[in-house]
Amino acid sequence: MAQKNTVRLTVNMEAMETFAAQQALAQAAQVLRTGGTVAFPTETVYGLGANALDAQAVEGIFLAKQRPAWDPLIVHVTDTAMLHRVVSCVSKSEQKLMDAFWPGPLTLLLPKQSAVPSVVTAGRALVGVRMPAHPVAHAMIAAAGVPLAAPSANRFGHTSPTTAQHVLDDLDGRIDLVLDAGPTRCGVESTVIEVGEEAIILYRPGAIAAEQIQAIAGRVVLYQASTRPPGSSQETARPESLPSPGVGIRHYAPNAVVFPVDVGDAPEAAQQERWLQAVGEQHPRQERVGVMLPSGWPVPKNFFGVQFAWGSWQNDKELAQRLFEGLRALDALGAELILCPLPSSAGLGAAIQDRLLKAAREK
């Protein structure tokens, strides 16, 4: 693709009413209205946005990210009026979930309006929609006046970005503008669900835990993806579109090989022993080893690899917020193998597990 001059503008969340902030938001909104691409912060990760009702603009997202057409996008809205430009109907259960979690990191798959181009949904009849809680995202979308298709602002399959610099590391020269409002709060993407007749289907664990959804709207079941990726040699027809964003076989991956360590559900001291054993076994086999290290956890005495201080093992919010930052940091330090303990699957741990296991899939 032709090289772009990617503009980086800073917005201070604590001073949204200043002239500088309003000017940056207005410039970003103008780029979006005229068919361009803008990377912007959400409460989850940085997204790469384009006018969701403009097929050519949306194509710019796929081109910049090198994202395959079979992987659908999430559309971001700011209010009910904008929502109904994107979706044709909302059930009582879906509305109940919106009331509970919007604005926030919950994406619902809903019947799309005909105005939404098929490129957004990979030809599917349902479109993923959410209302971001980040004040910069909300203000920018409102200023643009159009719903935004916006996946994470990184090269396809790579580690998601939680800072503007992460965005530029992947997409500088490939997009029009980046709004920099500092690190994101959640650090993992939105939860993606579909309200079915018998249960709520969880396509992607995320910043809203399954337990929270179940408490509001009933039973949640995890979507079981095919082990065969779209477009594999076993398929005779054209590649089938994915049913939802975030269900690709391999995703969220750094350049290094990711090695998740199952430390079980034992007391933390026993988990540390399993971790120490795993690091000790892998370390001699690979010189350039990196570890995502929870606070106070050990490494072998002769460990000569690189470490990222991940945070408290008991604080899943901190672990989620720093997950992608850590994977990128260890990549930058030259790690070729990254070991990371797997947290419990409760709460945000399910999202962390999902990201690590997908990052660990073979290329």
Image: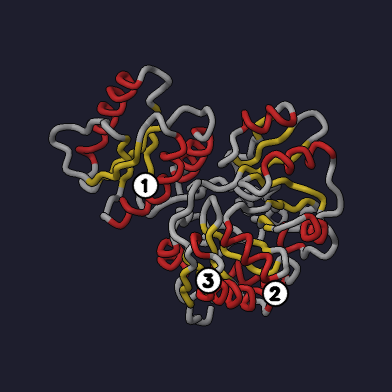
Task: Determine whether label 2 and label 1 are within 8 Å by CB.
Answer: no
Q: Amino acid at mark 2?
A: Gln
Q: Quadrant of residue 356?
A: top left
Sequence-wise, the earlier of marks 2 and 1 is 2
Decide: is 11 above or below 255: below
Q: Nearer the viewer, mark 2 or mark 1?
A: 2
Nearest the viewer among 238 and 188 is: 188
Element carrying mark 1: strand
Q: Amino acid at mark 1?
A: Val
Q: Which mark is residue 348?
A: none
Q: Which mark is residue 257?
A: 1
Q: Residue at x 65, y 40 (%)?
A: 203
Left or right of 284 in this view: 275: right
Decide: is 177 above or below 13: below
Q: CA distance from mark 2 to mark 1?
A: 35 Å
Q: Nearer the viewer, mark 1 or mark 3?
A: 3
Residue 186 in the image, given as x and y percentages of width and height:
50, 46
To which residue does mark 2 refer? 56
Q: Residue at x 84, y 59 (%)?
A: 113
Q: Quadrant of residue 264?
A: top left
Q: Amino acid at mark 3?
A: Thr
To which residue does mark 3 refer? 18
Sequence-wise, the earlier of marks 3 and 2 is 3
